[in-house]
Amino acid sequence: MARRNDFTEMIVRAYGERYALVAEPDRYRTAGQRVRDYLNGLLPVILLMRFKLLAASAVLIMAVASIYYFNQLVNASHAVHRSEAQVDVLMQRRSDLTVNLAVAVLDYSMYERQVFAEVVRLRAMFGQDDVRGIRLDELLSLNRRPGQPGPLPLALGGPSASASLAGLLAVAEQYPDLKLSLTFQSLMAAIVEVEKDLAAERLKYNEDVMAYMEFVRRFPSRIFAMIFGFTDQGYFIADEHAQRFVPIDASTPREERSSE
């Protein structure tokens, strides 16, 4: 080993200046220089390992960020769809209540029309003497129930006819509107409650859409939204008829108002 070092020293001394050799014989180096030369030799390896470490760290950070933002986007999207489904449920309930209300109104209107027609006919025939003091339930027990067409079962003559006529006229005067049925009132209350819930759910839907859109449009979540295919969601917007107030003209026929 010593002979080899001597030979190296001879070469460096002979050709060092001509070929700009920087190597020095080991015996002329200090311990610090040897350590520095050793570290300089390891520098390319360290740089390569650092590059690999940085690449692995970048991949790991990207994977963690992708999982986080994907889950956040899914949660925001599900919140929007949940609110939209709740709005659909309330709209279906409103539709069902509207159908039931229409049936109840039709049934009640037929009964009301029958009663008032009979009141007019009997008032013309018998007059208005002695028609006070008869209760509503006593009169209704003498008449047909809703949904049973036909004339009221009143015999035109005798004491029972006089009592029935008197009771009928008394109720017609004391209860001119015949007081809407409990079914009608309960259905109307249910529809009002559904409308309140529907308005609240529409507001909540717009809030969920706003939170989702803010998450989709902001950086860096916007990049992950584009990668995973999350698209924009639309807000609930009132239709054209709801955006402008149209007063109802009582002189306009109902058919014309419904067609507008």
Image (cartoon, helix red, strand yellow):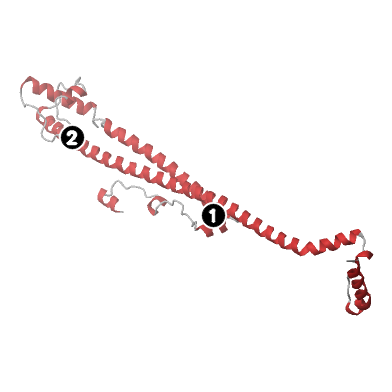
Residue at 90%, 69% in the rendered image: 5
Q: Quadrant of residue 58?
A: bottom right
Q: Which residue is mark 2?
A: 111
* Residue 242 located left or right of residue 109: right
Q: Residue furthest bottom?
A: 18
Is residue 24 among the parts visible in the rendering? no
* Residue 97 located left or right of residue 112: right
Residue 140 coordinates in the image, percent (x, y): 18, 26
Q: Residue furthest left?
A: 157
Vertical comparison of 86 with 225: above or below: above
Residue in front for this viewpoint, 230 or 228: 228
Residue in front for this viewpoint, 207 or 120: 207
Residue 243 coordinates in the image, percent (x, y): 42, 51
Identify the secondary structure beneath mark 2: helix
- Looking at the rendered structure, the kind of residue marked 2 is Tyr
Vertical comparison of 70 with 129: above or below: below
Q: Which residue is mark 1?
A: 216
* Residue 131 located left or right of residue 79: left
